Image: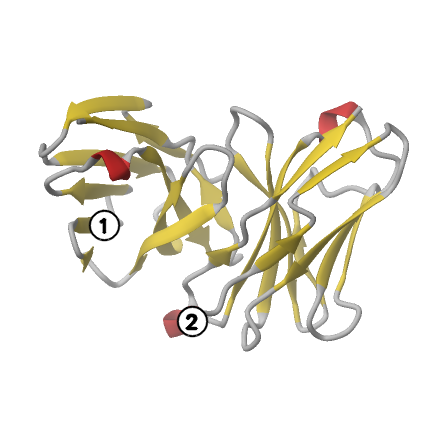
Amino acid sequence: KQEVTQIPAALSVPEGENLVLNCSFTDSAIYNLQWFRQDPGKGLTSLLLIQSSQREQTSGRLNASLDKSSGRSTLYIAASQPGDSATYLCAVMDYGQNFVFGPGTRLSVLP
Amino acid sequence: EPEVTQTPSHQVTQMGQEVILRCVPISNHLYFYWYRQILGQKVEFLVSFYNNEISEKSEIFDDQFSVERPDGSNFTLKIRSTKLEDSAMYFCASRRGQVDGAEAFFGQGTRLTVV
């Protein structure tokens, strides 16, 4: 059974810092991996999708990498801003084409 | 930009009542999902739906739950005989297909409170 973990559980950084969020999964037989952002009490906003054959994806200040063989993905956020404060979730899509979510990393960027 | 819409945003119901949560997926999408998130916990898979039938369901999705695509656009989740532990945020998601269409888009959620 696929298990997804995320480290750290919470992170607080001053504005302007670059930071890395980590995601690990136990079964490397995945279709893709997607990073989401969730604001308190709100829905899930898709940030980046990495197909299993890809190594990384970039969107603006965000860069996500995938190492399928070791079961790891990282989300790199450059020049963090207070508006980046949210919970970041990673989710892997297994071959049943359903997502398994991690518990999230709660990020606070302090002005 | 197309989006997944869910109604209502918040539903309060008495224990034992039936509720129907509604979702309008993105129009050219073929795969539909319901997930739920109990406060402070992980987002959990409930059910996936493709080609007008359930593709897969989790252990959570027992006889209390059912899904339907009644009119080709709406996608509903029915919860019968609601229990206190059904209180959660329920998310609908859709995606177009495999490979290029693999990105999933989620709605803003329906917060269900069972009292």
Residue B101 - label: 2
Query: Which chain letter goes with mark 1?
Result: A
Q: In this view, does B42 lie above or below B77?
A: above
Q: In which quarter of the image is residue A101?
A: top left
The residue at the point 31 percent across, 36 percent down is A24
Discs 1, 2 touching: Cβ within 8 Å: no
Residue B63 is left or right of residue B3, and the answer is right
Q: Where is residue A15 in the image (x, y as percent from the top left)?
A: 13, 30
Residue A60 is left or right of residue B19, and the answer is left
Task: Count residues near mark 1 (Cα–Cα under 10 Å), then give few for <14, some for 14-19, many for 20+.
Answer: many
Q: Nearer the viewer, mark 1 or mark 2?
A: 2
The quadrant in which the C terminus of chain B is found is top right
Query: Hey, what amino acid is under mark 2?
Result: Gly
Q: Is residue A106 above or below residue A25?
A: above
Query: Hey, what amino acid is under mark 1?
Result: Leu
Instruction: Find disc 1 in the rendering and name its residue.
Output: A66
Looking at the image, which is closer to me, B95 or B10? B10
